[in-house]
Image (cartoon, rainbow, N blue to C red):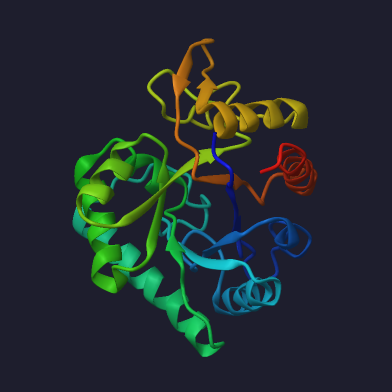
Amino acid sequence: MAMTIDLNCDMGESFGAWKMGHDEQIMPYIQSANIACGFHAGDAHIMRKTVALAIQHGVKIGAHPGLNDLAGFGRRNIPITPEQAYDLVVVQIGALAAVAKSQGSKLHHVKPHGSLYNMAANNEALAKAIAQAVLDVDGSLVLYALANSLSAQVATQMGLCVKQEVFADRTYQDNGLLTPRNQPNAMITDIDKAIQQVLSMVKEGCVVTTSGKVIPIQADTLCIHGDQANALVFAQGIHTALQKEGL
């Protein structure tokens, strides 16, 4: 049983006049913030404000690089080459690193976003490109990767420190991958079900898939999506449930 679990949340995903997420309310409940870098969401102003908010709460700062897809929020499956993936990740890490440095802080980790994250989970070439991008910018950065995925395996083999990531509000398939968002039951909207899944993953090291199969899973860091309607309820409920378990 894990005695500690890092709670992370995708943040800084507002853009211009458009507000996304509940960053100010959720920040006190997490340990790591994955901050959008302007490609799938966010902009220079939002990046600066979100970094400042993370510093204020003592939350670790992570780059959240995604596809160049503002209209689709980085969740559309847009084919890219490994070289393009490498360039996207290098540029976005660099941008947020500069924002953090300007405020006297630095990056702790990198977590790819949306389709980029999911494509790399079972695509070795993309996984290698992303890991190499992180290594080339700053090999001391931690990579947050889908638990038990090819991306986690590849990055570890290449010498990166990898934290295996699990999800409170997403369901799993028998192969250990997340259920695609365009399929039924991809999201968990019931807080009690989410807490049950979290405790199973963190305490027992396993998760029940959509077919009812129990598969092993390693939980180093737990994601709570900040853009869902009941994100604050999830953050508060999961935080409280973990504390009650002595985690």
- The image shows residue 132 at horizontal and vertical percentages of 22, 60
**160, above or below 197, in the image:** below
Query: Is 134 on the left or on the right of 200, as rendered?
Result: left
**Image point (40%, 40%), residue name:** 118
- Please state which of residues 186 and 166 is positioned toward the viewer in this rendering: 166
Residue 234's image quarter? top right
Query: Is 69 on the left or on the right of 10, as rendered?
Result: left
Query: Is 233 on the left or on the right of 145, as rendered?
Result: right
- The image shows residue 77 at horizontal and vertical percentages of 39, 41
Which residue is outermost to the top? 212
**Image point (79%, 47%), residue name:** 236
**103, above or below 3, in the image:** below
- Please state which of residues 211 and 198 is positioned toward the viewer in this rendering: 198
- The image shows residue 39 at horizontal and vertical percentages of 46, 64
Query: Is 206 on the left or on the right of 53, as rendered?
Result: left
**Image point (80%, 44%), residue name:** 233
Q: Quadrant of the C terminus?
A: top right
